[in-house]
Image: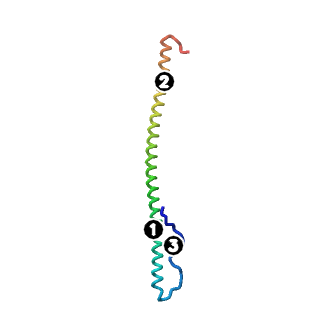
Amino acid sequence: MSDIKLTNEKMNTYSGDKVGTFKAAAKLAEFGERQNEANLVLAANVNDLIKRVCALEDKKSEDEEKFRLIAEEINSFKKELDRLRLSDKLNTAAVERLSRAEHLASGDSGK
């Protein structure tokens, strides 16, 4: 951030003094110089704010991309988990059928 801080003193460009006709030009030049200094301070602070906003927007874009990738991984994991659950259920049922068939083939009533 800029080392130039906005203060009331830096932004106060008009003293409010009454100026005579002959001193008007000098006072006007003094006012112009003060106004230029205030404008420089203000511009430096505005430029710093613009840089900070741009940095935050960049970080937000990076974070959104990370969250999108995480969401894709979670969806992929959920699909794989569902597939494994279905396989487990089908395999368990197949093992139970084979076990019953083996018991029936051996003459066991299965009790």
The residue wearing badge 1 is 43
> Residue most toward the bottom?
21
> Residue most toward the top?
107
The CA distance from mark 1 to mark 2 is: 74 Å
* Amino acid residing under circle 1: Ala
**Figure coloring:** rainbow
* Amino acid residing under circle 3: Met
The CA distance from mark 1 to mark 3 is: 12 Å
* Amino acid residing under circle 2: Ala
Q: Residue 93: give its label.
A: 2
> Residue most toward the right?
111
Q: Residue 11: give its label.
A: 3
Residue 40: image x %, image y %?
45, 70
Label 1 vs 2, first from the N-terminus: 1
In front: label 1 or label 2: 1
Q: Residue 18: give its label.
A: none
